[in-house]
Amino acid sequence: TQLNYSTDGRHHVTVHDPSGPITLDVHASSNFREHVVFAPIDFEIEDVICLEPYTMTTNFVNLANEGVDSGLIVLTPGETWRGDISIACS
């Protein structure tokens, strides 16, 4: 697994399967400040991985209440938020 940041702040995560020719690329805009990589070992289906771009940290509400910058985004009525994610498998 490799995480890179481009000069414009975009995130790029690449996961390559060492046992086969599969590569997964996830690109996310800079307003996704976290990436979670999850691979359960007790899942019924083998060879599962999940790459999740996050706008905020796990447990963000409690951390924000403790004064920690967790990335919590609060929108007022009518306000919008946009981000983009692309996923490619080759």
Image (cartoon, rainbow, N blue to C red):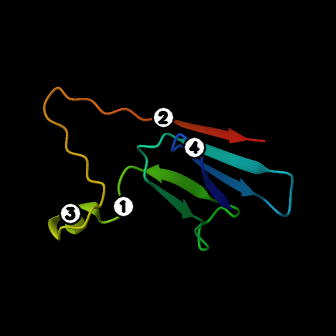
Q: Amino acid at mark 4?
A: Thr
Q: State the residue at coordinates (68%, 53%).
A: 14
Q: CA distance from mark 1 to mark 4?
A: 23 Å
Q: CA distance from mark 3 to mark 2?
A: 24 Å
Above or below — where is 19 with respect to 6?
A: below
Q: Amino acid at mark 1?
A: Thr
Quadrant holding the N terminus = bottom right
Side of 45 relative to 8 (left or right): right
Picture quadrant where residue 87 is located: top right
- State the image coordinates of residue 15 (x, y, percent, origin top left): 70, 56
Above or below — where is 24 with respect to 59?
A: above
Q: CA distance from mark 3 to mark 1?
A: 10 Å
Above or below — where is 47 with respect to 22?
A: below
Within 10 Å of disc 3 (Cα), the crowding (few <14, some 14-19, many 20+) is some
Side of 26 relative to 74 (left or right): right
Q: Amino acid at mark 2?
A: Asp
Tag 3 residue: 64
Tag 2 residue: 84
Q: Are marks 1 and 4 in contact (CB under 8 Å)?
A: no
Q: State the residue at coordinates (86%, 52%).
A: 21
